[in-house]
Amino acid sequence: MRPERRLRWAAIPVGIAAIVVLAGCTATELNGYLPGFIEDGPQATNRTEMVSGLWVNSWIVLLVVGVVTWALMLWAMIAYRRRKGQRGLPVQLRYNMPIEIFYTIVPLILVIGFFAFTARDQTILETQYEEPDVSIVAIGKQWAWDFQYNGEEEDGSDAVWTMGVQAVPEADGDVDQDSLPTLVLPVDQTVQIELLSRDVIHSFWVIDFLYKKDMYPGHENFWSFTPTREGTYAGKCAELCGEYHSAMLFNVEVVDEAEYEAYLAELRAAGQVGDITEDYDRNDNLPGTGVTGVTVEEG
């Protein structure tokens, strides 16, 4: 039997074995043990699987490259080792065009491939919904979060809001989850979050959503996605922002539409209505805020 035919027949059972192994993997294993996935349910958002796919496939390619590289290194160490009785240097090979083309072209293909897939997914992730079902403003501050749920009015007069305080750990280090700022989102509704900062650079990170985005003083940032699974998700600031950065925690609760509307009605009944985006802002005289100076009255 010719070597090509032998390789072909050997590849069949290997392929079948690989299919069987992958078919037996759980959702968590198929997505690289990343958060945001459960065994019997959808991903956390409509973008979560895209992020995990880019991560897992990149590692698969890198692992293949690593195995090939390690194998070549091991082969070179064994095949070209110094034998007993040998003296001096081995025969030196120079200007081997096939090898030089190989180690030039292959890395170039890998870099272009990584760039292309990353740019493709980033373009999708950064595309904002033009008319989202829900428009929210998340405001970072040292060291907590404020959330504003926009209404129909452009001046924000019909918006409702919550203002949070930083987490205070107990003696054993535990944090009362009920006291954390909570962002409520409706499931299967398109969401656009405007990200603002009252003071320094923060980063809005919902761990199970596999995505985070920075919040810059005097600059608007946006994030669009659709929550696809009800539940409570942990969030935190992912940018070192000062002494109590580790206490800048929050939760995200994804609920059905009726519960979401009831929550907004509850905030409205409590009198938490209006635009709070400029409240307690410490950036009144920074570039990009639209304020050119501070007026000092004599008296």
Image (spheres, helix red, strand yellow):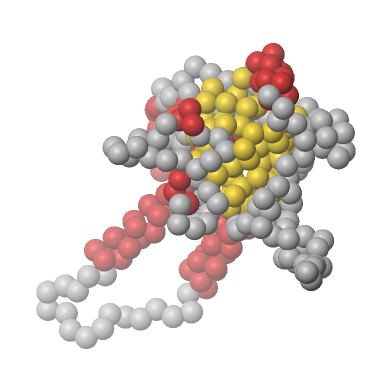
> Residue 36: in sight, yes or no?
no
Q: Quadrant of residue 48?
A: top right
Q: Is residue 148 above or below residue 254?
A: below
> Looking at the rendering, in which quadrant would you find the C terminus?
bottom right
Look at 32% across and 80% down and name the residue there.
91
Question: At x 53% / y 37%, what residue is drawn?
Answer: 250
Along the line of sight, the residue nearer the viewer: 172 or 89: 172
Q: Quadrant of the N terminus?
A: top left
Name the residue furthest top. Answer: 258
Query: Which of the pair 18/165 is nearer the observer?
Result: 165
- From the top left corner, tell me how far across and down residue 37 is, in percent: 50, 28
Q: Please tell me which residue lies in front, 153 or 134.
A: 153
Relative horizontal placement of residue 297, taking residue 197 as reference (left or right) = right
Choose between 79 and 248: the one closer to the eye.
Answer: 248
Q: Position of residue 257 (x, y in %)?
A: 69, 17
Residue at the far front: name it. 299
> Is 169 left or right of 85, judged from the image as shown?
right
Total marks shown come to 0
Residue 254 in which image quadrant: top right
User: Residue 99 appears at what percent x and percent y?
Assistant: 48, 68
Q: Is residue 157 visible?
A: yes
Q: Is residue 99 above or below residue 170?
A: below
Q: Residue furthest bottom?
A: 88
Q: Give the residue drawn at x 77%, y 39%.
A: 275
Provide residue 227's location: percent of width, then percent of height: 64, 27
Asked if residue 281 is positioned above or below residue 254 in the image, the reply reads below
Is 194 on the left-hand or right-hand side of 156?
left
User: Which residue is at 29% across, 60% downward?
Assistant: 74
